[in-house]
Image (spheres, rainbow, N blue to C red):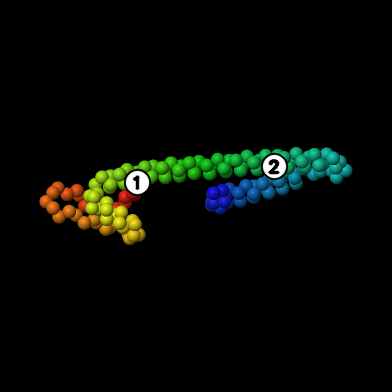
Amino acid sequence: DGRNRMNSPCYRVSVCQLRSFSISFLSSVLGAESLDNSSSGASVVAIDNKIEQAMDLVKSHLMYAVREEVEVLKEQIKELMERNSQLEQENTLLKNLASPEQLAQFQAQVQTGSPTAGAPGPGPTTGKTQKPAISYVRICM
């Protein structure tokens, strides 16, 4: 959502810095040259040129700020994709290690909205080889 990005701290700081710079730049540019009031046509052209220069400078600074924010967001996306991949692998491993009873219990807990963290599933009581008990469950069905 564009509004969320515009409210981000990085965006607000960039805009404030840009606004402050633009104001000081315009003040220095327009104040540096004393314009003769008798040649109003030349004055208007000179002011228009200064405004155009200032707008070009503002545009370049804004583009720099946007590029910087894009790089930050790309890095965050990369980190989130890596974390997602890691969690998917962990999820697959946990599914493979969980017994059918544990999976059924987890499914029931998901449907009822009960907490699942730290809730070990009931182990089978037969003499057959058991899968290791899982102390926490993070399985997405």
The residue depicted at 64 percent of the width and 41 percent of the height is 59
Q: Secondary structure at mark 1?
A: helix
Numbered circles on residues, count: 2
43 relative to 133, above or below: above
In the rendered structure, the answer to whether residue 87 lies left or right of residue 58 reads left
| Horizontal and vertical percent position of residue 5 | 54, 49
Q: Amino acid at mark 2?
A: Ala
| Horizontal and vertical percent position of residue 69 | 53, 44
The residue depicted at 26 percent of the width and 45 percent of the height is 96
Using the image as rendered, state which of residue 76 and residue 116 is in the foreground.
116
Circles 1 and 2: CB distance less than 8 Å? no
Using the image as rendered, state which of residue 29 and residue 138 is in the foreground.
138
| Horizontal and vertical percent position of residue 33 | 77, 43
Q: Nearer the viewer, mark 1 or mark 2?
A: 1
Q: Is residue 91 visible?
A: yes
Q: Name the N-terminal-most of marks 1 and 2.
A: 2
In the rendered structure, the answer to whether residue 129 lies left or right of residue 40 reads left
Q: Secondary structure at mark 2?
A: helix
Q: Is residue 11 visible?
A: no
Residue receiving disc 1: 87
Q: CA distance from mark 1 to mark 2?
A: 49 Å
Using the image as rendered, state which of residue 41 and residue 33 is in the foreground.
41
In the rendered structure, the answer to whether residue 104 lies left or right of residue 75 reads left
Mark sitting on residue 96: none
The residue depicted at 28 percent of the width and 57 percent of the height is 118
| Horizontal and vertical percent position of residue 39 | 86, 41
Q: Sort mark 1 into few (<14), some (14-19) or many (20+) by Cα contacts within 10 Å.
A: some
Q: Amino acid at mark 1?
A: Leu
Residue lying at the far left in this picture: please name it. Answer: 127
The residue depicted at 75 percent of the width and 45 percent of the height is 30
Residue receiving disc 2: 54
